[in-house]
C-alpha cells in the first residue's frame, strides 16, 4: 500500500474520539446479572417492541442457557473487541444455523405491526432535518417543526464525524488487530483513520472507484474496476487479484474462499495459498443475468443478490447453485444472515425474511414494507444484548428496527443516501453517506425513570 500522508496533527489528544476496544461489563457482572434474572419471565411488551416501563420487572432478552466463558467474553463491549468478522460475538455472524433458543422467532416476525412505539420522537415534529438548522441559522429553536438533530430515538448517539472523502462512501472496514479504521469511496481513494484521535493518517490513491471494501482478520479487500486489491495490515502484503470484468460491487469471505460479485453478473472465487502467500483463482459462478451487488455466507451456503432481481443459493462445498429465489421485484441490494434466517432488502421497498422448510429450501416467512427503496442491511446488538437491524433507504435515512418485531427503535438522517454501514466494538457503528462523510455512532444506555 502506498500512503499519501496528510501531514496533519496526529499527536495524542486528551480526548479520545473513538476507541476500538470500548468499555463493557465484566464477566462477573454479566454472570451476576444472569443469576439475578434467571427466574424471571420474558417481557411480553418487549417482544412486541413497545415496552415503556422503566425499570421493567421482566426480562428484556430471550431466555437462554447460562453463558459459557467464551460467550461472556465475546459479548458487546468485551475487551477483545466486537468486529463483524468475529462470529463468536454476535448472532449476526453469517452462520444461518438454528440456535434452538430462537426457534419461536418464526412466529413473531412483525406480528405487532411496523410503526413501533415512537420512543424518542419529539411530539408534533416532522421526520425531516431542518434545512436552516443544517446551515446554522434556524431561529425557531424548540418551536421548529423540523428536526434539529441527525437522529431520532434512544439508545444511540453521534460520537464524531470524519471529513475528507469527496464522493459517496462505498465501504468501511476495521481489520482485526489494527487500531485503524479504513474507509473507501467513489472518489478513488481509501482513507486510514486513527481510532484514538480520529485523525486521518493517510490516503491511498487507487486510480478507480471503490465499489466495496471488507476486512477479514488482518486482511482488507477492496473492489475496484477489473481488480480486487488485497492488503495485509500486519505484514504489509499488497496484492492485486485480476479477473473481474467491470466494477466489483461486493465481496465476502467464507470457507477459506474469497468471493467477488461483479458488473458482468459473475461471481469470481479465489483460494488463499499459504505456501505462495497469494490468492489463486478457484472458480467462476455465472448463473446471474445481470450484475451481482450483494453477497453473504451462512450455513455452508453462499447467497448472492443481483440486479436481475433474484437471490441465488450456492453450496460452499460444490460451488453449484442449489436454489433461485425470485420474490423480489427489483434489485436485491443487500443480504444478511441472522440466526436461522436470511434477510434481504431491495429497491422494491421491502425487507424479506427467509426460513428453511422441511425440504431445506428457503421460503419467505415475513415481508416488511417501507415507503422507499432499501439499500443496505447491517445487524448489531444494543447494550441490553437485544438484536437490532439497521437498514438504509434512498430517502437518505437509516431505520433501526428491533428484531423480530420490526418495531422502529430509531432513525438516522444524512444529507445524501447512506451506502455503507459497519459495526464496531463496544457498541460503536459507522455510517458513510453520498457526500463522503463518515459518522461514528455509539450505543448508549436508555434512560430509566427513578422510583
Image (tube, helix red, strand yellow):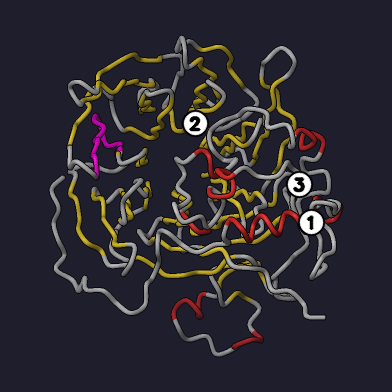
Q: Neighbour class for label 3 at 10 Å: few (<14), some, many (≥20)?
A: some
SS at circle 3: loop
Pointer 3 or 2: first along the chain? 3
Seen in the picture, residue 115 relative to 363 is either above or below; the reply is below
In which quadrant of the rendered view does residue 53 lie? Answer: bottom right
Choose mark 1 or mark 2, whichever is in front.
1
Q: Main secondary structure of the magenta part?
A: strand
Q: Which quadrant is the C terminus positioned in?
A: bottom right
SS at circle 1: helix
Which residue is depicted at the point 75% across and 65% down?
Answer: 118
Residue 223: within the magenta? yes
User: Where does residue 185 sit, x and y in percent of width and height?
Assistant: 31, 50
User: Where does residue 299 sit, x and y in percent of width and height?
Assistant: 57, 24
Separation (CA) of disc 3 from disc 1:
11 Å
Bounds of the magenta span? Answer: 221-233
* In this picture, residue 96 sits left or right of residue 363: left
In which quadrant of the rendered view does residue 98 lie? Answer: top right
Pointer 3 or 1: first along the chain? 1
Which residue is depicted at the point 18% across and 71% down?
Answer: 8
Whether residue 228 is visible to the viewer of this picture, yes or no, is yes
Separation (CA) of disc 1 from disc 2:
35 Å
Seen in the picture, residue 440 relative to 346 is either above or below; the reply is below
Q: Which residue is mark 1?
A: 37
Pointer 1 or 2: first along the chain? 1
Which residue is depicted at the point 66% across and 86% down?
Answer: 143
Which residue is depicted at the point 55% across and 57% down?
Answer: 397
Query: Between 33 and 101, which is closer to the camera in this rendering?
Result: 33
Picture disc at residue 296: 2
Separation (CA) of disc 3 from disc 2:
26 Å
Query: Between 121 and 280, which is closer to the camera in this rendering?
Result: 280
Q: Which quadrant is the N terminus positioned in?
A: top left
Amino acid at each position: 500500500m502506498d500512503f499519501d500522508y496528510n501531514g496533519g496533527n496526529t499527536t495524542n489528544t486528551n480526548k479520545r474520539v473513538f476507541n476500538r476496544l470500548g468499555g463493557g461489563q465484566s464477566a462477573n457482572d454479566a454472570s451476576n446479572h444472569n443469576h439475578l434474572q434467571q427466574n424471571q419471565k420474558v417481557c411480553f411488551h418487549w417482544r412486541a417492541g413497545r415496552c415503556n416501563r422503566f425499570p421493567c420487572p421482566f426480562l428484556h432478552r430471550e431466555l437462554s442457557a447460562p453463558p459459557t466463558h467464551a460467550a461472556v467474553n465475546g459479548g458487546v463491549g468485551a475487551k477483545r473487541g466486537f468486529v463483524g468478522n468475529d462470529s463468536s460475538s454476535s448472532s449476526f455472524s453469517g452462520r444461518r444455523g438454528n440456535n434452538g433458543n430462537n426457534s419461536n422467532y418464526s412466529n413473531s416476525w412483525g406480528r405487532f405491526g411496523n410503526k413501533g412505539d415512537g420512543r424518542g420522537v419529539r411530539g408534533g415534529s416532522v421526520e425531516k432535518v431542518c434545512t436552516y438548522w443544517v446551515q446554522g441559522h434556524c431561529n425557531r429553536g424548540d418551536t421548529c417543526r423540523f428536526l434539529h438533530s441527525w437522529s431520532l430515538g434512544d439508545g444511540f448517539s453521534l460520537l464524531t464525524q470524519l471529513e475528507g472523502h469527496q464522493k459517496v462512501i462505498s465501504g468501511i472496514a476495521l481489520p482485526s488487530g489494527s487500531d485503524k479504521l479504513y474507509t473507501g469511496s467513489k472518489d478513488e481513494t481509501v482513507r486510514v483513520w486513527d481510532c484514538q484521535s480520529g485523525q486521518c493518517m493517510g490516503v491511498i490513491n487507487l486510480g478507480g472507484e471503490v465499489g466495496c471494501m471488507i476486512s477479514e482478520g488482518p486482511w482488507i479487500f477492496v473492489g475496484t474496476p477489473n481488480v480486487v486489491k488485497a492488503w495485509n495490515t500486519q505484514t504489509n502484503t499488497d496484492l492485486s487479484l485480476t479477473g473481474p470484468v467491470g466494477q466489483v460491487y461486493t465481496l465476502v469471505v467464507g470457507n477459506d474462499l474469497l468471493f467477488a460479485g461483479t458488473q458482468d453478473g459473475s461471481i469470481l472465487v479465489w483460494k488463499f495459498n499459504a505456501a505462495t502467500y497469494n490468492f489463486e483463482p478457484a472458480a467462476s459462478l455465472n448463473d446471474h443475468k445481470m450484475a451481482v451487488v450483494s453477497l453473504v455466507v451462512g450455513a455452508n451456503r453462499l447467497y448472492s443478490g443481483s440486479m436481475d432481481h433474484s437471490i441465488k443459493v450456492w453450496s460452499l462445498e460444490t460451488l453449484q447453485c442449489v436454489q433461485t429465489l425470485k420474490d423480489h421485484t427489483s434489485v436485491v441490494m443487500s443480504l444478511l444472515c441472522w440466526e436461522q434466517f436470511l434477510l434481504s432488502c431491495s429497491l422494491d421497498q421491502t425487507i424479506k425474511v427467509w426460513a428453511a422448510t422441511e425440504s431445506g429450501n428457503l421460503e419467505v416467512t415475513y415481508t416488511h414494507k417501507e415507503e422507499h427503496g432499501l439499500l443496505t442491511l447491517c445487524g448489531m446488538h444494543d447494550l441490553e444484548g437485544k438484536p437490532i437491524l439497521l437498514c438504509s433507504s434512498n430517502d437518505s435515512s437509516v431505520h433501526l428496527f428491533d428484531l423480530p418485531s420490526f418495531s422502529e427503535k430509531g432513525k438516522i438522517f444524512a444529507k445524501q443516501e447512506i451506502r455503507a454501514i459497519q459495526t464496531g466494538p463496544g457498541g460503536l457503528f459507522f455510517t458513510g453517506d453520498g457526500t463522503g462523510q463518515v459518522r461514528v455512532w455509539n450505543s448508549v444506555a436508555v434512560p430509566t425513570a427513578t422510583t
